[in-house]
Amino acid sequence: MTAPAKPNEIDEKGIASGITVEIRGRIKGFKKVQPDNGNDFISTLIVRPAKDAYSHPTTFSVNSLSRIGGEGADIAVKCELRPYVRKRNGEDYYNVSLWVIE
């Protein structure tokens, strides 16, 4: 197992790691995710208020090893952005997932 990256460190592939953000909002719901590798985690939907009556609220999916609060709770959590690459039909797609810093 490798040591965790320092904040904003660039790895050998040129990808920044250890970038952190704070997400503030209300918990809309959560679900347990059971990937094939057996490393279960919780995905929590956090909704931020809309800017005005004509805008849609922004929703984030935040991953963690345990629940971070109950449905309807207002929270602020610090998260690490974790980049990953997935392939589909021979194409590479670059994505980012949010993980709670525990």
Image (cartoon, rainbow, N blue to C red):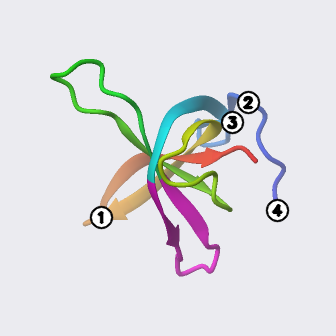
Whether tag 3 and tag 2 are in contact, CB under 8 A, the answer is yes
Spatial CA distance of label 4 from label 1 is 28 Å
Whether tag 4 and tag 1 are in contact, CB under 8 A, the answer is no
Upstream in sequence: badge 1 or badge 2:
2
Could you say where residue 46 lies in the image, as x and y percent from the top left? 46, 44
Upstream in sequence: badge 4 or badge 3:
4
Return the residue at label 2.
Answer: 7
Q: Secondary structure at mark 1?
A: strand
Q: Range of the magenta residues?
A: 29-44
Spatial CA distance of label 3 from label 2 is 4 Å
Q: Residue furthest left?
A: 54
Whether tag 1 and tag 2 are in contact, CB under 8 A, the answer is no
Kind of residue indicated by mark 2? Pro
Name the image quarter holding residue 10: top right
Return the residue at label 4.
Answer: 1
The residue closer to the viewer here, 58 or 49, is 49
Return the residue at label 3.
Answer: 18
Kind of residue indicated by mark 1? Arg
Q: Secondary structure at mark 4?
A: loop
Q: Secondary structure at mark 2?
A: loop
**Residue found 30% across the figure and 19% down from its top:** 51
Q: Residue furthest front?
A: 72
**Residue found 79% across the figure and 46% down from its top:** 4
Q: How many marks?
A: 4
